[in-house]
Amino acid sequence: MLCVMDIKKWQYEIRIELPRNGEFRYVNSAIEALDCMMSCWPSLPDAAHRLALNVCIATLAGEKTPDASRIAFTAALVSAGMTFISGENSPGGKSITT
């Protein structure tokens, strides 16, 4: 049986500066956040990272809202000390640097 996920985009993207090379990555959905957390995360997973993974998976399963995954992912970014821009006018939106 084929399982098709309904990938709902977030209202606003998040632009992340990757610490390894200074390049930027744009994340705009729970599936993109999962990929980022699994492929380019700069630190060991902590509680915020694990929670964000679980919320993103629940979002893809239709158990959580896209906004819930965005909020959890943002909290994981802060916890990891990553530099990112999030907001209506991203990349010119609200800048959060930790």
Image (tube, rainbow, N blue to C red):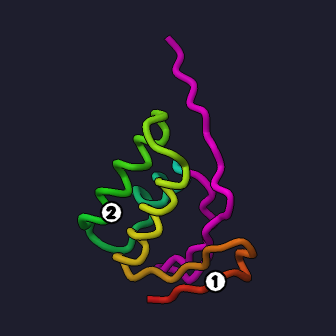
Residue 17 magenta-drawn? yes
Residue shown at the point (71%, 77%) measured from the top left: 91
User: Position of 7 compared to 91: left or right?
Assistant: left
User: Position of 78 compared to 33: left or right?
Assistant: left
- Residue 76 found in image quarter: bottom left
What secondary structure is found at the residue carrying circle 2? helix
Residue 64, compared with residue 47, is above or below; it is: above
x, y percentage for residue 87? Answer: 66, 73
Q: Residues within 10 Å of mark 1 (few under 14, many from 20)?
A: few
Residue 44, compared with residue 98, is above or below; it is: above
User: Position of 41 compared to 94: left or right?
Assistant: left
- Residue 17 found in image quarter: bottom right
Q: Amino acid at mark 1?
A: Lys
Residue 9 magenta-drawn? yes
Q: Which residues are magenta?
A: 1-29
- Residue 94 found in image quarter: bottom right
Q: Which mark is residue 12?
A: none
What secondary structure is found at the residue carrying circle 1? strand
Q: Amino acid at mark 2?
A: His
User: Position of 19 compared to 16: left or right?
Assistant: left
x, y percentage for residue 98? Answer: 43, 89
Q: Residues within 10 Å of mark 2 (few under 14, many from 20)?
A: many
Residue 9 versus residue 38: which sits nearer the camera?
9
Which residue carries the number 2 mark?
49
Check whether the beta carbons of the residues at disc 2 and disc 1 lie within 8 A of each other.
no
Which residue carries the number 1 mark?
94
Residue shown at the point (63%, 57%) measured from the top left: 28
Comes first in the chain, label 2 or label 1? 2
* Residue that extends furthest to the bottom in the rendered view of this protein: 97
Mark 2 or 1: the one toward you:
1
Residue 44, compared with residue 17, is above or below; it is: above
